[in-house]
Image (spheres, grey):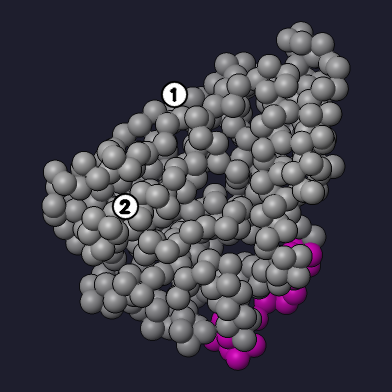
Amino acid sequence: MLLFTPGPTPVPEFVRVAMSEPTIHHRTPEFEEIFATTRTLLKEVIGMPEVLMLASSGSGAMEACVTSLCQTKLLSINSGKFGERFGKIAKAFGIPNIEIKNAWDTPASVESVLETLKQNPDIDAFCIQACESAGGLRHSYEEIAKAIKDYNPKIMVIVDSITAMGVEKLDVSCVDALIGGSQKAFMLPPGLSIIGLSQQAIAKIEERNVGFYFNLKTELKNQVKNTTAWTAPTTIIIGLCAFLQKAKSIGWDKIYQQTKARSLSCDKAMESIGLKIYPTKPALSMTCVYDEASDTLRKHLKTKFNVNIAGGQDDLKGKIFRINQMGLIEASEISWVINAIELSLADLGRRPFDGIANQVFLENYFSLLK
């Protein structure tokens, strides 16, 4: 089965081999050495002064950032299930929250954010997705973050980049917390979250000292010493270290170039067979197609062609399908997926197969790699 859901992504063989080694204790010099190497490699990828690894899904990192960095009122962007989650976290902890709510295909605007800040001078933290994976939407978080810092540099900017970290070079110049997850572009099992931190965020975390398990001050104190406050997910961290070493040997710029070429070319391929890309500003991490018969198509792909892609949630359930573009994906694999989609449309009587989708993909992909 070809797993092409936008998380979890497939775990490559070299990562599985690294994680299959005998388990080592997390309070040993051997693990501390691996942890130190992983921290160094993560800092190189993220480009921020400090990085934390938590034994949790990405939602745990989202919770930790909201509780640690927001003291008075949170402003969050809700353009899908994961933007909605920031508001739910605030509500769970009794933190006042204002949402800017958009359709799932519509990115946030600088103007709406600044207007809300002017109307609510007590806002001290802002949350947004780099990629809202519920609909494959890319927010211009970097433009919004810069506008916020120009308006009030004390406002903490929290960016959920769980489906963007490792996909493209992320601008963190105006970001205080950048959230990632193991099961996306880093091609690991779920269970590890990542937080890149600015110096301003570090100072606020030290000052606030909030929470118990998700207390980032406690984690900082330990992780700068290459250990963790609580039991570390040792096997996943060992796998992450192996993946980051491999990615560095390939070159992140090359990985970013290949990911962009693959994603843009797949979008073009889908359009060539009459399908509609859903978001008005698509993210590179996935190809998201609006199709009201998507569940039938997905079932056919899985049963006949051994291809597993993702559907939609809530109002988009049964109306979209999403193809992963994150990680180290061979052109031959995405080519198989594209061919399978066109063949499935023919099997379902929707259009005759003529091979145009794969032709468009390959022509665009290799031209973008020049």
Mark 2, Cα crowd under 10 Å, few <14 / some 14-19 / many 20+, is some
Which residue type does callout 2 highlight? Ala
Is 366 on the left-hand or right-hand side of 50?
Answer: right
Q: Position of residue 30 (x, y in %)?
A: 64, 88
Instruction: Please indicate, yes or no, whether residue 126 appears anywhere in the rendered image.
Output: yes
Q: Position of residue 146 (x, y in %)?
A: 35, 55
Q: Which residue is mark 1?
A: 315
Callout 2: SS:
helix
The disc placed on residue 219 is: none
Q: Is residue 29 magenta?
A: yes
**Where, by quadrant of the figure, is residue 177 drawn?**
bottom left
**39 lies above or below 186:** below
Q: Which residue is mark 2?
A: 147
Is 213 on the left-hand or right-hand side of 57?
Answer: left
Mark 1 vs 2: CB contact within 8 A = no
Mark 1, Cα crowd under 10 Å, few <14 / some 14-19 / many 20+, is few
Which residue type does callout 1 highlight? Asp
Q: Is residue 267 magenta?
A: no
**Magenta-drawn segment:** 14-32
Q: Residue furthest top?
A: 349
Q: Position of residue 358 (x, y in %)?
A: 82, 29
Residue depicted at x 45% and y 75%: 50
**Disc 1 from disc 2: Cα separation:** 32 Å
Select label 1 or label 2 by which is in front.
2
Residue depicted at x 33% and y 70%: 201
Residue depicted at x 76% and y 57%: 12
Which image quarter is the N terminus in?
A: top right
Q: Observer-nearest residue: 324 or 188?
A: 324
Q: Position of residue 150 (x, y in %)?
A: 28, 58
